[in-house]
Image (tube, rainbow, N blue to C red):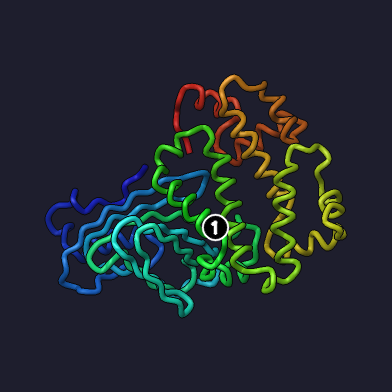
Amino acid sequence: MVTLLDSRQLTGADRHPAAVVARLQAGMSSRVRLREPAASVQVRLDTWQLGGLPVLRADVVGPLVVSRRRTPADTPPVLSLYVQERGTGRHEQGGRRRALPPGTLTVTDISSPYDFCWGDTEGAGSALQVPVARLGLSVDVVRRAAPRAPDSPLYELVRAHVDRVTRDAERLAADPGWPALSVATLELVRALLVSADGAGDTVPGESLLPRIRTWVGQHLTDPGLDATRVAAEHAISVRQLYRLCSAAGFSLEQWVIDQRLEGARAELARPGGRPIAAVARSWGFGDPSHFSRRFRAAFGTTPREWRAQQASGAVTE
């Protein structure tokens, strides 16, 4: 855990409300303001990393508002899955306004205009941030589905998952199973968005790609997994497969490599496992040296170093 801001630890002019708001804004990607400029404010902002997914928790006293009006065109879109923990928050995006009593999940495209406050006088909550590029869905589908998330039959399932993951982020980030947990979390978020978008509103390619990703995720250890087999399993041509992935800004080959590396890393974290070369082969890497280079490029450490760190109880990101 990293504490980005704890206003109780500040002294002198740094405790002034305007200075606290400026510090809070520096730790977030959006504009922060006080609805009442003369009001007092107290803030604690903590952050964790869960498999490359940022988790933020804010505990706020004071009438603070977070908003975004304009975003540079080249800013990668990011979703925030926020669970209100205390107080009644307020959220508005795309013409939809929602009150957020404790336990409510709201899905926000933080690269599009929105307004949010933790509560009238105080509130707290945690957010899991997910880059849209990691979901394998088009930006249009994601932005269309996000405000509809509460209407999905999967809403309660994903709400409970995000609530638990964000509340226990510090403990879970130290668990050897967290690489697999982050993959499962992405799959749940993807499922929620596909469900919220609705089969009737989704063009065939947009509904097919999530099914392809799910199927590929279930066959990552198959040695014969390639584009030809994926296309055949889904009754489309290889050219159609690549065209579909390209339209969504999604590289099938890179995603397969990333998922295989995540799977291998999770296995290497378990005590008493197979030799590294055997783990590499089982996850589709026939050359151990190639596997080690890929692993280091992705995670900043070698497979051998990673296994030793987990065996000694070290926590790394």
Q: Is residue 189 above or below residue 269?
A: below
Q: What x and y, as percent, mark residue 22? A: 27, 63
Q: Secondary structure at mark 1?
A: strand
Q: What x and y, as percent, mark residue 203? A: 72, 71
Query: In the figure, residue 236 lies in which quadrant?
Result: bottom right
Q: Residues within 10 Å of mark 1 (few under 14, many from 20)?
A: some
Q: What x and y, as percent, mark residue 155? A: 52, 60
- Left/right placement of residue 141 relative to residue 251 reads left
Q: Is residue 282 above or below residue 255?
A: above
Q: Quadrant of the N terminus?
A: top left
Residue at (80% x, 43% y) in the render? 225
- Number of residue marks: 1
Residue at (58% x, 46% y) in the render? 184
Camera-side residue of 110 and 299: 110
The type of residue carrying mark 1 is Pro
- Left/right placement of residue 222 relative to residue 306 reads right
Residue at (47% x, 66% y) in the render? 108
- Left/right placement of residue 70 relative to residue 143 reads left
Please identify the residue farthest to the left as the structure is shown: 12
Query: In the figure, residue 283 lies in which quadrant?
Result: top right
Residue at (67% x, 21% y) in the render? 275
Please identify the residue farthest to the top as the structure is shown: 272
Q: Is residue 71 above or below residue 288?
A: below
Q: Which residue is mark 1?
A: 131
